[in-house]
Amino acid sequence: MSRFQELQAYLRQHWQALDAAANILVVPSLSLDQQEMQKIPGSHHYEERLLFSLIRLRNPRARMVYVTSQPLHPTIIDYYLELLPGMPASHARERLLLLATYDASNRPLTEKILERPRLLARLRQALPPGRSFMVCFNSTARERDLSVALDIPLWGLDPDLLYWGTKAGSRQIFAESGVPHPDGTPLVFHPDDLAEVIADLWHRQPQAQRFVVKLNEGFSGEGNALLELPPPCGETHTERVQTVKAQFPHMRFQCPTETWAHFAQRIRELGAICELFLEGTNKRSPSVQGQITPAGTVEILSTHDQILGGPDQQIYLGCRFPADPAYQAQLQTWGLKIGHNLAAKGALERYGVDFIAREQPDGTWDLQAIEINLRKGGTTHPFMTLKFLTNGCFDPQTGLFLTPRQHPKYYIATDNLQRPSYRGLLPSDLLDIIVYNSLHFDSTTETGTVFHLMGCLSEFGKLGLTCISDSADKAQHLFDQVVRILDEETQPLA
């Protein structure tokens, strides 16, 4: 048994004690394909998305080490610590160690940490074996190497199981679990092979208008391209292949700077699949989030309706909690099936499943699964922020989030509130606006707005926020109010 497997076995055996009082290392490294990450404005600031983890410091026995590529602005840290209910921020600050690599290069944070022996030594000193564990945004071989180097377990996925979170792996899980999903192709690694399997798919779906080509490891919809199909479907396989090849250069990419030549090279590097584009006049994109505990149990954490944008509504922008009651229970049912399949394969920690929901003529909704995310995602931080702020929990019977006083809470959240007029705002400027306009989260009423990605503001004019209230309508009203105030506050002076 490798040392990593030994550490994971220790985590499973001692999870309750570790979770109750431990030294927690947070490594918010986006260890994803860096070419795909560069398509997202301000992606290097996404290391801030795990700052909700600071709310773990509400446990007076917990200690935390948070590592970033570049130092975080002190105002941002103070903002999160002030959110801690029933605890002086100074008490939490004493139990928080902030470290940085001082390396702004476009590489995963974990890689930077592993390159710095003295930083590793400081981490070993702060994280005693047997009383510490590590959390991250997503697990790769780098995170496994860091776990072993520090001799602490990783509360996350074994990187050997990463295939099940790819586009091709997701389709296999759906098939094994009996979960409906669009007709599609096997994984291929060359554009010529892609044309062949798409021609077969077109033969099976002769009425199809569009297909979606997906890089096997695309992120946030940025690796998707829409392939329009000219009618009619060719009579022979060779004719269909030639038609598909002719259409490749004309695909609509979700990233405006993408080209067919570059996309073809990415297919050779990452592989790609193709799926039937699900048409519909009333179509939504719900998701379900679950967790596989170290004890092997599977639990549903939340459901959302995702807010999508981009040329063909393929890019994740934000979410609403909870998902529509019309299909919320079915999301949980499919989510549990997929979770049990993943657990049987040895998966651990968080997973999310994205669906397409289409309203049928009789008013019911058809759900089709489209991908699994074996990592934290855009719906993770708003839900966990709500959970840690209120100490409430998701009720699978009602599909609602209930506070300890049994009050339901709703929210709308985004990572992508972006305006040119926001550029130049410092974190302290944002706090001035928040305080002056009373936009902060009120722990008494357990309503208000929590902001994140503050580091993106000055350079990119980009901000994240979660608006929490007592109903879906009130959460939307709060969101609209916050956006209106921010827009007004950042208008040029006359």
Image (cartoon, grey):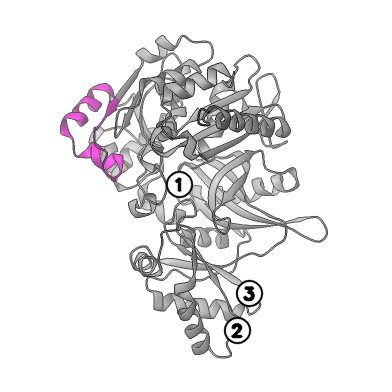
In this view, which residue lies farthest toward the right?
Answer: 362
* Alpha carbon distance from label 3 to label 1: 35 Å
Residue at image position (59%, 28%) is: 485
Q: Is residue 11 toward the left or the right of residue 436 in the image?
A: left
Helix, strand or loop under label 3: loop
Residue at image position (24%, 32%) is: 102
Neighbourhood count class around disc 3 (C-alpha, 10 Å): few under 14, some 14–19, many 20 upward: many
Find residue 454 and report its image quarter. Answer: top left
* Alpha carbon distance from label 2 to label 3: 9 Å
Find disc 2 in the rendering and name its residue: 233
Please state which of residues 7 and 108 is positioned toward the viewer in this rendering.
108
Q: Is residue 3 visible?
A: no
Of mark 3 and mark 1, the one earlier in the sequence is 3
Q: Is residue 357 toward the left or the right of residue 257 in the image?
A: right
Asked if the residue under mark 3 is in contact with the one under mark 2, i.e. CB atoms within 8 Å, the reply is: yes
Q: Is residue 345 visible?
A: yes
Residue at image position (27%, 29%) is: 100
Find disc 3 in the rendering and name its residue: 208
Neighbourhood count class around disc 2 (C-alpha, 10 Å): few under 14, some 14–19, many 20 upward: some
Highlighted magenta segment, given as a residue range = 99-127
- As shown in the figure, which amino acid type bears the numbered disc 1? Ala
- As shown in the figure, which amino acid type bears the numbered disc 2? Cys
Residue 347's disc is 1
Find residue 458 and report its image quarter. Answer: top left
Residue 117 is one of the magenta-drawn residues: yes
Residue 283's disc is none
- As shown in the figure, which amino acid type bears the numbered disc 3? Ala
Residue 366 in picture, x, y percent from top left: 71, 58
Find residue 101 and report its image quarter. Answer: top left
Please state which of residues 465 and 144 is positioned toward the viewer in this rendering.
465
Please state which of residues 408 and 72 is positioned toward the viewer in this rendering.
72
Residue 74 in picture, x, y percent from top left: 36, 20
